[in-house]
Amino acid sequence: MEGSAASYFLMSWLDPSLLALTAAGALAGVYIGAIPGLSVTMAVSILISFTFSWEVNEALALMGGVFCGGVYGGSRTAILLNIPGAPSAIATALDGYPLAQRGEAGRAIGVSTVTSVIGGLMGVAALAIAAPAISDFALKFAPRDYLLLAIIGILLVGSLSGESLAKGVFAGALGVLIGMVGLDPMTAEGRFTFGQVSLLGGIPYVAAMIGFFGVAEALVQLRNLNVAPIKQKVDRIVPGWSVIRKYIPLSIRSSAIGVVIGALPGTGGDIAALMAYDNAKRTVKNPSRPFGQGAYEGLVAPESANNAAIGGAYIPMLTLGLPGDAVTAVIIGALFIHGLKPGPMLMIETPHLFWFTVGNLTLANLFTLVFGLTGIRVFAKMMECPRAILIPLIIVLSVVGTYAIQNSVIDVYWMLAFGVLGYFMKLYGYQVGPVILGVILGPLMDVSYRRAMLSVRDDPAMFAWELVANPLTLVLTLSIVLLLASQTPAWGAATARVRRWRRNGG
Amino acid sequence: MNQTRPRLPGERAFTLVLLAFSLFLLVQAFRISGFESVSSPGVFPMIAALVMVVSLAAALFRDRAAPPPSDGGPAAFFREVTPPVLLLTLALIVALMLTLEPAGFPFAAGGFLFAAILLLQRGRPVRAAIVAAVALTAIYVVFRLVFQVVLPEAEWL
């Protein structure tokens, strides 16, 4: 087993086409992540439709490269333009842009590149170590546990990423209903089909993904057409060893935060980066400069965390079949298309896929390091690409991507409808991430709920008892109760009282 | 997590439309299998639709404290939420979809790229035509020739 794990790990390193696809993915990811208006989720959604006829390893190699490169790439524009290229780079802009204004853009990019890769490799190491253990443990999960985990995922992404939990929960439930359309997987009864044959197979979720993440984002970008690009002077970017050595401890600490946050179902690099930044702000005693005014520590913490969250997000995806964030939700969709079913059995039935993913993500991180430290002049030119060109391009790529799924214009209509809905949702403070999470998790939740009910012979009282009778289920149930309680005014009042009590010496 | 930003024009109406749609879905979910049993095919859709209704009602309740838009009339809606550039771009996207199969990908997408770039950069047709031609060629080569993606061919060719 040892030898075969190593050969699977090295598969993308030794196969020239996989090596080239990983490199191309990382290179494209760095630029996609950096260009405001293009997102990793958008790119991976569009890629699914182009790669579904490929071998699964080739598709995963390209997507893994785009994922790693893209999460890192968001930092570039955060530092140079104060515009985070991706949500995971929001915290990076807080100190990155002040550094660029001080004329230290090159050094800031160098430090963020190296610490991003340190974070990325820590995340992959955590994936390699934790996933087999979690997978073994997950075999003991009952259907009710999967149901509760999926609810936690939707609640977490809804409460942490949007402006209100209510809107986040609505978005998640909407996604669940979109995932319900079509024939019921257990009884083959039609649900929300309205007598239309075209709806029997369900709504193509790739069209929903491209609509919500591609077209909706392009339409929102139309509102920022007149923002003039800022130009920054960039000097030498390869940082010295002494600089790197200084920030390694903080990078490792922040990576640990990133792995844990990334591994929670539904939370990804954006939340990990903000939490790591907050942690660095509270724990670093003597930062190079005050936080918010160009502290390198304020750059190292979020960049390490958001890249570490990639490996973290793969853990629940591969072991439980639950996406760690929006991008892994899309990648789960890709695995479904290739006939694979992520979950504890994936590690047993197709261990090669797991070790291939670990090896591929390691390689993608190394390519990110190479592409992150080179090609800055080309990059500066590309960043100047006006939105007037970028937006029509995104739309054409979205149309091509959606059409390619089943060569159907109907899917393109779905995509546009979701794009328009996503535009209004984004504008009015509804997050679209929970929708996609709901689309992916909806069928799993439905089947888990019904299996759990059938296991107690349709007795709701027994079902409720099961939620508290088993230690693991009890922990999950309490997590949901706490998550919901934390959003109530009573919780705010109670925590304020505890803080006052502590301040007054307990 | 409280909403403190002022409401945008049409925000409450949008929430109400979503609420009406959610109620419609709740009724449709009930019609799948009613209350036949707690594990019937319609139960989970009913739960999901009910969650949509309750969460939207909660959002409406919470948003009541948000400052209303300074100008909430239809003119403000068309200016701030659906500006002309958005409506025109949407019209171009619809035209792209309608012409995709009859005209084929190169003509439909080429026409869309040219018109959209022309619209968004407000003029400069020669530049728009060159950029559209270069972009279209790149997309065609990468996706049709390299990735072997099937693109709609013109019906009359």
Image (cartoon, coloured by chain):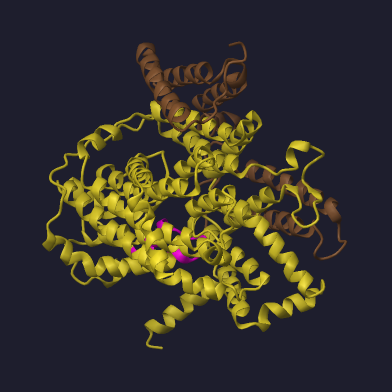
Chain colours: A yellow, B brown
Q: Is residue A176 above or below residue B120?
A: below
Question: Closer to the camera, A137 or A31?
Answer: A137
What is the quadrant of residue A243 in the picture?
A: bottom left
Question: Closer to the camera, A495 or A310?
Answer: A310
What is the quadrant of residue A455 in the picture?
A: bottom right
**The N terminus of chain A appears in which quarter of the rendering?**
bottom left
x, y percent for residue A2: 40, 70
x, y percent for residue A317: 51, 61
Instruction: Give the prevailing secondary structure in the magenta stretch.
Output: helix
Question: Looking at the image, can residue A428 be seen?
Answer: yes
Question: Closer to the camera, A500 or A237?
Answer: A237
Question: Closer to the camera, A14 or A427?
Answer: A14
**In the rendered view, does A420 fall on the left or right side of A248?**
right
Seen from this angle, which residue lies furthest right?
A: B36
Question: Looking at the image, can residue A171 be seen?
Answer: no
What residue appears at the point 15 percent right and 54 percent down from the top-left corner? A239
Q: How many marks?
A: 0
Q: Is residue A309 magenta?
A: no
**The C terminus of chain A appears in which quarter of the rendering?**
bottom left
**In the rendered view, does A126 fall on the left or right side of A49?**
left
**In the rendered view, does A62 fall on the left or right side of A470?**
left
Q: Where does the magenta region start and end?
A: A262-276
What is the quadrant of residue A172 in the picture?
A: bottom right
Q: Is residue A394 above or below residue B11?
A: above
What residue appears at the point 49 percent right and 25 percent down from the top-left corner? B85
Q: Is residue A268 magenta?
A: yes
Seen from this angle, which residue lies furthest bottom?
A: A506
x, y percent for residue B1: 50, 60
What residue appears at the point 43 percent right and 65 percent down from the top-left corner? A261
x, y percent for residue B2: 52, 58
